[in-house]
Image (cartoon, rainbow, N blue to C red):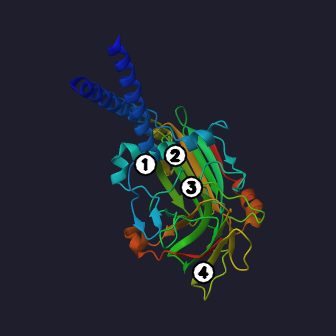
Amino acid sequence: MKKLLFWLSATALIAAIGHVATLLYFQFNLQSAAIEKIAGQKPPNTLNLLAPVGAKSMFTPLVSPDISYGYCSYDISENPLRVRVQLPSTYWSLAAYSTEGKNFFTINNQQIKTEQLEIVFALEQQQIYLEEGTTIVTPPSETGLFLFRTFVPNRSLTEVVQAQMKETSCTPL
Amino acid sequence: MLNWIYFLISLTLGLGAGIYSAQYGVRQGAAAPAVVIGPWQSLTETDANELNPYVLAHASHYGNLKLGNFEALYFMAKTDGENVSLSGNCEYRVKGKVPEAKWWSITIYDQNGMLIENQADRYSFNATNIPLKNKAAFNISLAANARPDNWIPIKPDAPFVIVLRLYSPGINSIRDVNEISFPRIERLSCS
């Protein structure tokens, strides 16, 4: 009986160690699977438009078929990145995500009334070289992704919306 | 010799159980949804959840690049108003008032979060393409076969989920999701 209890306790202890070790592995490898899947396809610091979302073209689960997506995976380890967006008249948002997939910055059509938006993503030590008056965003990590969402009022307008989104750019300074 | 065999069994069972339970916890997010109102569960992470290692790992590995609360609120329904799982063998009506948001949509996915392939190439209705009653209320039909009104096809014999998105939601909705007028999900018939 004592022997059985001993081995049951040992098994429970090993299970606890395995559980914590697996959780730690996840903690130290927080890399957004969605970002990896999207950003792994193209070089960083270039704008890419994703194919209109449909049953056969979903870059990650639960994306909206009513939105057209453009993205730029950023790497500002060497230079800041300037993002220029020609703003559509409909709903849009520009959201930036860290490598872990955490949304750290968002701006949308409710906040900007101009036709063009210009933002520079820069690390703190890079900001002294930027012109005064520049709108600066400091990401929590050197790499990540920004996602530009534009509402497509009707699926037949997808091409029109995408043509407008092509005016967006992300360029290293 | 017998002790070594016990040790190997203990090691195998222990590690297997430990790794599986951790993966299961991460897969589930190991936290109850932040808010549940009728069949609608909030998909938005709360500040408290951000300290939860399971939730953090879940969001990273299975997250879908969601927006923050002030930008958008997301809700998912896996059941109808009577708490019965949504099934492609039934027909449903989703009806409600226009939500307090600058823009909103209702989308149907399979249980893995993928859009359901259909000939009509229709997966959702949104604030601008749905015909409204008196500019204030809407009706959506969910059925495997075509329906005359606002119809979204579902797949027979397969479970599905409904996702409600509110973009630029009203401040009252952000402060307290109980203020949101959630659509009702009525099961009409089943085959």
Residue at label 4?
B138
Residue A173 in view in this figure: no
Residue at label 3?
A94
Output the chain of dot 1. Answer: B
- Label 2: few (<14), some or many (≥20) within 10 Å? many
Labelled pair 2, 1 in contact (Cβ < 8 Å): yes
Q: Is residue B84 left or right of residue B176?
A: right
Q: Quadrant of residue A73?
A: top right
Labelled pair 4, 2 in contact (Cβ < 8 Å): no
Residue B61 in view in this figure: yes
* Of marks 4 and 1, the one in the foreground: 1
> CA separation, marks 4 and 1?
33 Å
| Numbered badge on residue B29 | 1
Where A65 falls versus B181 (above or below)?
A: above
**Amino acid, disc 2:** Tyr
Where A99 falls versus B66 (above or below)?
A: above
Q: Quadrant of residue B130?
A: bottom right
Residue A143 percent coordinates (x, y): 52, 37
> CA separation, marks 3 and 2?
21 Å
Residue A48 percent coordinates (x, y): 68, 46
Labelled pair 3, 2 in contact (Cβ < 8 Å): no
> CA separation, marks 4 and 2?
32 Å
Q: Name the residue rendered at 27%, 26% in the picture.
A: A4
- Label 3: few (<14), some or many (≥20) within 10 Å? many
* Mark closer to the chain start, 2 or 1: 1
Q: How many marks?
A: 4
Q: Secondary structure at mark 2?
A: helix
Residue at label 2?
B62
Q: Quadrant of the C terminus of chain B?
A: bottom right
Report the front residue among A138 and B104.
B104
